[in-house]
Image (cartoon, rainbow, N blue to C red):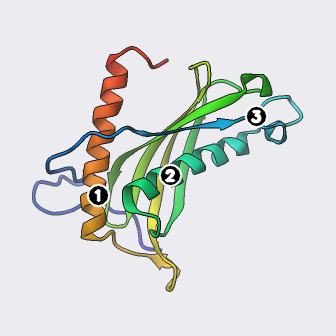
Amino acid sequence: MEPLSPSEGPGHAPGAFAISGPYAPAPVEEIEIAIRWRDMDAYGHVNNAVYLTYLEECRDRWVRRTLGEDVGFVIVRVAIDFRRELSLEDGSVVVACSGTGYGRSSIRTAETIRANAGWLAAESESVIVAHDAGSRRSRPITDRERSALDVAIEADRVSVRASEGSGDRT
């Protein structure tokens, strides 16, 4: 697999990600997932590995909405900060995913898991890489994908800023 790299070219500082063009704001991908009995561990709370499944489901939807149903990608990094335990009594969680940037073959996302009551259970950052199934290697993000990512990432930034300004975040 090739190393992750930020966008390069005029106006792109090392480590910066490309955002340009006119945007039509769209909501951050957000889904509600029921907490199931099988999600519990011996301590009576949602097992830490299940958080990964919740995040994956939302991230997959964000990618499919942004880039289409046929795009291939693999996850190469995920970091989770667990803020508060979830239990079966919480009923469900609301998982949100937004794009934060991209490089030559990588896409960065930020996710949250909130109890249905609204409090923050976990925050996550992920890196996925565009994947060529035939060669089983990373591939560069296409110009069409870059254009779609530009629009989605800016829309997500607008949406996140609006929710931060409304005082809805914990």
Q: Nearer the viewer, mark 3 or mark 2?
A: 2
Q: Residue at x 36, y 22 (%)?
A: 164
| Amino acid type at image mark 1 | Ala
State the separation of the CA atoms marked 3 and 1: 35 Å
Where does residue 94 sit, x and y in percent of width and height? 58, 32
Taking 32 as reference, is 126 above or below it?
below
Taking 100 as reference, is 127 above or below it?
below
Asked whether the beta carbons under mark 2 and mark 1 sit within 8 Å of each other, the answer is no
Q: Residue at x 55, y 49 (%)?
A: 78
Question: Nearest the camera: 87 or 106?
Answer: 87
Mark drawn on residue 148: 1
Indicate which disc, 3 or 2, sits on the residue closer to the N terminus: 3
In the displayed image of the protein, which residue is found farthest to the right? 42
Q: Is residue 85 left or right of residue 7?
A: right
Mark drawn on residue 76: none
Mark drawn on residue 46: 3
Q: Residues within 10 Å of mark 2 (few under 14, many from 20)?
A: some
In the displayed image of the protein, which residue is found farthest to the bottom? 134
Q: Residue at x 31, y 48 (%)?
A: 152
Q: Residue at x 56, y 20 (%)?
A: 118
Indicate which disc, 3 or 1, sits on the residue closer to the N terminus: 3
Where does residue 138 sit, x and y in percent of width and height? 44, 74
In the displayed image of the protein, which residue is found farthest to the left? 10
**Which residue in the structure is indicated by mark 2?**
61
Q: Residues within 10 Å of mark 3 (few under 14, many from 20)?
A: many
| Amino acid type at image mark 3 | Val
Indicate which disc, 2 or 1, sits on the residue closer to the N terminus: 2
Q: Nearer the viewer, mark 3 or mark 1?
A: 1
Q: Is residue 149 left or right of residue 43?
A: left
| Amino acid type at image mark 2 | Arg
Q: Is residue 46 left or right of residue 74?
A: right
State the separation of the CA atoms marked 2 and 1: 15 Å
